[in-house]
Each structure stands twice: as structure tokens, then as C-alpha cells.
Image (cartoon, grey):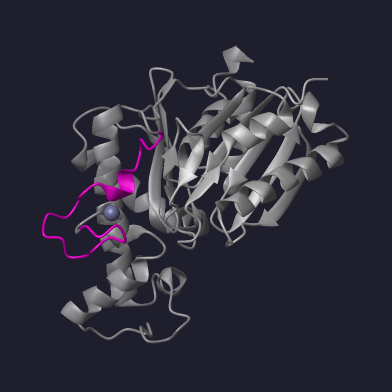
């Protein structure tokens, strides 16, 4: 029986799964992503998770046919590694991936993608229509997209295509992004930045609100929880809808997708409050065909399922390549 490995390397957790040729998961393992001493510790933890998943599936790593990896970035695709990951401590400079995994699994067929690109491969593979033109958008602690156009999953020479969260939406640069630049989509609408954005909006226009900006527990969820009950919270949610719709309209104009599937914690936890304002505005903002905008059906598994789908289809998500 041919078996395939999928790996999801996140800033918090590592997941490895073993699947059969129909993408049914036979074994899985998770671990916390090590915070050091160096990137090699992260590589070792991934190899251990793959061994554990193989053990649960009753297969030896050397018999695996192919492996897909969905990883935090930025990537150095030529080296098959993560370089200076933004969301891990500075002492983790480089995480070698394809070389050591290829050696463990005794296969050259190891496909490395950033996590949103793995996401679109998974969405494409698991979508009934297996569309050639689709986008997976994540609105989470950050914002990013995986894009498939004319059947080609776009990665860019270095593997970092689809960093749409760093598109400039606001030329006035009201908010500064974590990357240091002003006016980026992510600076307004990512889970990490929504609380900061709300606080700045309130400083401009201090209307009555139940929101407690100085509460250490204050988060994006605090704002969404007050939807419909607090005028200021509704104002923030409306502004988020404005920026999200503008970002999605830019994606549509650039790539002409048939369907956009949206995931990430902000969208998954508040599907209507996040997606309806986008759908409502696209008619006015888009001059080409308007795609379906759906919540992902793969939930938190989208990256690891995309990694498996990549292993099964030579890095494409195209079911005709099974
Ligand atoms: Zn940015």
C-alpha cells in the first residue's frame, strides 16, 4: 500500500500525518514547535513527529512514497528551508526541511510550500469541482493567500507568492504593519492587529463603548462578542468589512478566481461577521466576475490536509494527477 506524509509546521505546533492514496489519515502526531536552541531542534521535532505518525500507521518511514509540507515562512525554496521565521525567537535562524525529511523518508518527492499555498492545494483537492482557478485566504494572526490560476499553484521563485496581507490598502497609512510599513491590510484586519486598530479608532472618536482597551484580556474576540450590542464595536466590524472587501476585490482583479475559500481563526470564529460584509460590498467594488466567497470546510486541518494533497498530486492539488 502506498502511503504519503503531510507536515504542518506552525509557529506554535507541528503536525505530521500519514495517509493512504485516498487521503484517508492512518496515523498522526503533534508536538509543540521548539523555541530553540537553533532551527535544527525544530527539524528534529518534525522528524520525530513523522516517525510517531508512521508508527501509529504501522509503516516504516523509508516506505513513504511522497511528502508535502505546509510551513510558516519566509521560505528559501532552493535550500528547502525556512529562513529567519518572523514568529519564532531570533535564535531560530534557519530550519532545514526538505533535505532531512527526504533522507528520513528515502524519497526525493518532498514538496515544500508556505502554509497558505498548502491551504489552496488542500482546498482545491477537497473541492467537489477541483477548480483550476481558486484562492485560499486566511484571516488569522496574519493575513495571506494561496492562489491557483489556470491550474498552476503560484509559488514565486522563492516560494513567497500570495503575501496579500502586505498589500497597501490605506495610502494614508493610519496603521503600521508588523513588517514596519504603513497601511497594509494585515495592520487593520489580522487577529493580532484588530485590537490595536479598534483602540486607535476610539482615540480618534471616543464614543461610549463597553470595550475595555486596557484590559489585558482585550482581544479581537472582545469586539466580535459585542456585535449588535455596542455601537462602537459595530463601527469597528464595519471598518474591518471595508478593508477586507477592498483586499478581496484586489485579489479578484489580480487573479480572476471562480471561488475564494476563507479560513483562519478570525474568519472561522466569526464567519458571518467577517464574510457577509465582504460579500455585500463586492458588487460595488469589482468590475469583473464576482466569485463565490465561502468559509473553508477544512477548518484547522486545512494546512495539513493540503500537505497530504500535495504529496498525492505532485504539489498541485489536481485530482487528475492522482
Ligand atoms: Zn506589512
Q: Which sits in the foreground, 42 or 203?
A: 42
As drawn, 127 above or below 162: above
Q: In what quadrant of the picture does the C terminus appear?
A: top right
Q: In what quadrant of the picture does the N terminus appear?
A: top right
Q: Which sits in the foreground, 313 or 135?
A: 313
Residue 315 in view, yes or no: yes
As drawn, 200 above or below 315: below
Q: Is residue 177 magenta?
A: yes
Q: Which sits in the foreground, 159 or 228?
A: 159
Q: In the image, 90: left or right of 110? A: left
Measured from the top left, where is residue 278 in percent x and y?
32, 48
> Where is residue 37, by image quadrant?
bottom right
Measured from the top left, where is residue 297 in percent x and y?
57, 41
> Which residue range is magenta in the image?
159-181
Measured from the top left, where is residue 90 in percent x and y?
45, 61
Q: Which residue sits at x=54%, y=24%?
A: 315
Residue 205 in view, yes or no: no
Q: Which residue sits at x=45%, y=55%?
A: 140
Q: Is residue 262 magenta?
A: no
For ligand 1, the image quadrant comes to: bottom left
As drawn, 121 above or below 279: above
Q: Which residue sits at x=35%, y=35%?
A: 161
Q: Which residue sits at x=65%, y=35%?
A: 101
Q: Residue furthest right?
A: 58
Q: Residue furthest top?
A: 320
Task: State the predominant SS element of the stretch in magenta.
Answer: loop
Q: In the image, 49: left or right of 141? A: right
Q: Which sits in the foreground, 263 or 97?
A: 97
Measured from the top left, where is residue 313 in percent x and y?
60, 20
Amino acid at each position: 500500500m502506498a502511503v504519503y506524509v503531510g507536515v504542518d509546521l506552525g509557529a506554535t505546533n507541528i503536525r505530521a500525518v500519514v495517509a493512504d492514496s485516498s487521503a484517508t489519515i492512518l496515523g498522526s502526531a503533534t508536538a509543540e514547535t521548539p523555541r530553540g536552541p537553533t532551527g535544527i531542534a525544530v527539524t528534529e521535532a518534525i522528524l520525530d513527529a513523522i516517525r510517531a505518525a508512521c508508527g501509529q500507521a504501522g509503516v516504516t518511514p523509508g516506505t513513504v512514497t511522497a511528502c508535502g509540507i505546509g510551513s510558516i515562512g519566509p521560505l528559501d525554496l532552493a535550500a528547502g528551508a525556512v529562513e529567519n521565521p518572523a514568529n519564532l525567537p531570533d535564535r531560530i535562524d534557519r530550519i532545514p526541511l526538505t533535505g532531512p525529511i527526504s533522507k528520513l523518508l528515502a524519497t526525493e518527492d518532498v514538496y515544500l510550500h508556505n502554509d497558505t499555498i498548502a491551504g489552496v492545494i488542500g482546498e482545491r483537492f477537497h473541492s467537489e469541482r477541483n477548480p483550476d482557478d481558486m484562492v485560499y485566504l486566511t484571516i488569522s494572526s496574519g493575513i495571506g493567500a494561496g492562489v491557483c490560476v489556470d491550474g498552476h499553484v503560484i509559488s514565486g521563485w522563492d516560494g513567497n507568492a500570495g503575501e496579500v496581507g502586505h498589500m497597501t490598502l490605506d495610502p494614508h497609512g493610519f496603521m503600521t504593519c508588523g513588517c514596519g510599513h504603513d497601511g497594509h491590510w494585515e495592520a487593520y484586519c489580522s487577529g493580532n492587529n484588530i485590537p490595536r486598530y479598534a483602540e486607535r479608532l476610539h482615540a480618534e472618536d471616543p464614543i461610549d463603548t463597553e470595550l475595555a482597551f486596557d484590559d489585558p484580556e482585550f482581544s479581537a474576540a472582545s469586539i466580535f462578542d459585542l456585535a449588535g450590542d455596542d455601537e462602537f464595536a459595530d463601527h469597528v466590524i464595519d471598518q474591518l468589512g471595508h478593508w477586507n472587501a477592498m483586499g478581496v476585490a484586489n485579489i479578484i482583479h489580480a487573479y480572476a478566481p471562480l471561488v475564494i475559500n476563507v479560513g483562519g481563526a478570525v474568519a472561522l470564529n466569526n464567519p458571518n461577521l467577517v464574510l457577509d460584509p465582504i460579500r455585500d460590498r463586492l458588487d460595488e467594488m469589482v468590475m469583473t466576475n464576482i466569485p463565490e466567497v465561502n468559509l473553508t470546510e477544512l477548518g484547522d486541518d486545512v494546512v495539513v490536509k493540503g500537505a497530504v494533497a500535495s504529496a498525492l498530486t505532485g504539489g498541485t492539488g489536481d485530482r487528475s494527477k492522482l
